[in-house]
Amino acid sequence: MSGEDAVLVIGTGAVPFGRHYEMTVATLAAPAILAAIADAGAERKDIEAAYCGTALGGMMAGQRCLKLIGMTGIPVVNVENACASSATAFRQAWAGIRAGLHEVAVVFGVEKLTRLSGPLPIEPDDWEGAYGMVMPALYAMRARRYMHDRGATAADLAEVAVKARRHGALNEIAQMREPTTVEEVLASRPVADPLTLLQCCPTGDGAAALVLASARAARRFSGAGAARPVRVISSTLVSGRYMTGFRDMTSPEITKRAAQLAYEAAGLGPEDLDVIETHDAFTVAELIYYEALGLAREGEAVGLLRSGATSLGGRVPVNPGGGLLARGHPVGASGAAQLVEITRQLQGRAGQRQVAGARIGLAHVTGGGISGLDHGAAAIHVLSV
Amino acid sequence: MAPRRPERLSKYAPVAGEGNDARLVGGRCTRCGKLVFPAPEFCPECAHADIEAAELPQVGRLYTWSVVHAARPGWTAPYVIGYVDLAPDIRVLGHIVDVDAGELAIDMPVRLRGRTATAKIGAEGAPAFEFVPAREHRNR
């Protein structure tokens, strides 16, 4: 999509991710929303609609956030798709612009995970949730099988966390900004064997926001100082397919299917990508997604990681913002945070973690633990300048 | 206040029999034959609502497992859960007991057992079954 049909990201904003006990869902989101609007060179009155993604933020989270900053009266859509909530909200804003419902919309993701205790819950009416499944265990079981099937080691998995923390150290909004080592990762306490604490995304709070506009409307905000617009070249959302029996946990059908659709819609392939944000909620996930996104052939993910190709300075940096492991994973905010990172990379505004010459970026997020599905949702967005 | 009745997650009682004679009870669609565990209210293949009870094999293969240390509130950690493939269409999440985690292996055969009264794992209302290694125990 190009020209007058294009949907553009014209502004981004985010607050530092971390444990913000004293803040509310609304006080987390408001600064991110205001920052995105200012970044676009727009004003609050220019925003015609709002899409809020949150998994656990409660009823009417969007209205609660917008009320705080005097943005009431416009259509507000609250979107829940677990970890894919704000990526799904982004897609709805994109679709709304394409459909002509509005020309300028704000998307934001927000989560206050420090309200919870223990790992992210699975719904009590889910069979496996009722029988002791927790998200870290789901990924741990993937990790066990992945290590068996691919010959990967615990140290290989730990290298993902080391890379994430190396990148996160360069990201001013990251929750985990101290570099770490393979030894430290493996010596951290077990959460769900074989995954240790530093192989799991931290519990934290955060918010991120983007302003989307039609190409026509974007010209109104293209004055001096406005950020360079970034084009949304494809938006893909799929849900997981229910399989009652055997499922290859090392090769998630949901992400493979989403990636294929995303590449077809964008008219490009994995070899064309300059920068990627992927859903590394746990170390093993990043390796699995190298294969599912087509960056590596089956069995070659560890080699790709160890080659440095997916590190900053490599051929196709993955999770330059630190990923969910280091930036943090306030569930509903993560999709938006990934898109903020990709947008800023493509604008050449990523500071010390800038991927030189990045022109095409991809953001991939999955959401939800449901018995019999890889995940409930997967969203992939491809952006370019 | 009267206690709230738990939501029904399986059309039929998920376990028949006790101890080593226990069998899991799934559901089979009377129209297309699809076999599902736990027994569903609707067939996920054809959405037919006439689902009959069907007992499942007692022995399957352990596809993967994890020792869970970070449990939800109300659960006693650590515990071992794993996916057991009981039939081509049937993968069951179960607790793996009576074995050191170090003795577990990918694809090892495991056998269903009705849950013993002493087992502390599981939340209230959780189904009364677990898996143990299918072969006789080695010396500990």
Image: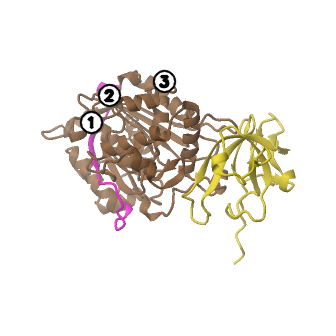
Chain colours: A brown, B yellow
Q: Is residue B92 left or right of residue A94?
A: right
Q: Residue at x 23, y 28 (%)?
A: A357
Q: Residues within 10 Å of mark 1 (few under 14, many from 20)?
A: many
Q: Residues within 10 Å of mark 2 (few under 14, many from 20)?
A: many
Chain bearing mark 3? A
Q: From what the image shows, is residue A104 above or below residue A98?
A: below
Q: Is residue A384 left or right of residue A92?
A: left
| Badge 3 element | loop
- Residue A43: % across, % down: 22, 50
- Residue A159: % across, % down: 41, 40
In-front residue for pair A28/A255: A255
Nearest to N terminus: mark 2 or mark 3: 2
Circle 2: residue type: Asp
Q: Are marks 2 and 3 on the same chain?
A: yes
Residue A19 part of the magenta segment: yes
The magenta stretch is: A1-25
Circle 3: residue type: Arg
| Badge 2 element | loop
The residue beneath circle 3 is A297
Q: Are marks 2 and 3 in contact (CB under 8 Å)?
A: no
Circle 1: residue type: Gln
Is any part of residue A234 visible from this angle?
Answer: no
Numbered marks: total: 3
Q: Are marks 1 and 2 in contact (CB under 8 Å)?
A: yes
In-front residue for pair A100/A215: A215
In-front residue for pair A355/B58: B58
The residue beneath circle 1 is A345
- Residue A315: % across, % down: 32, 26
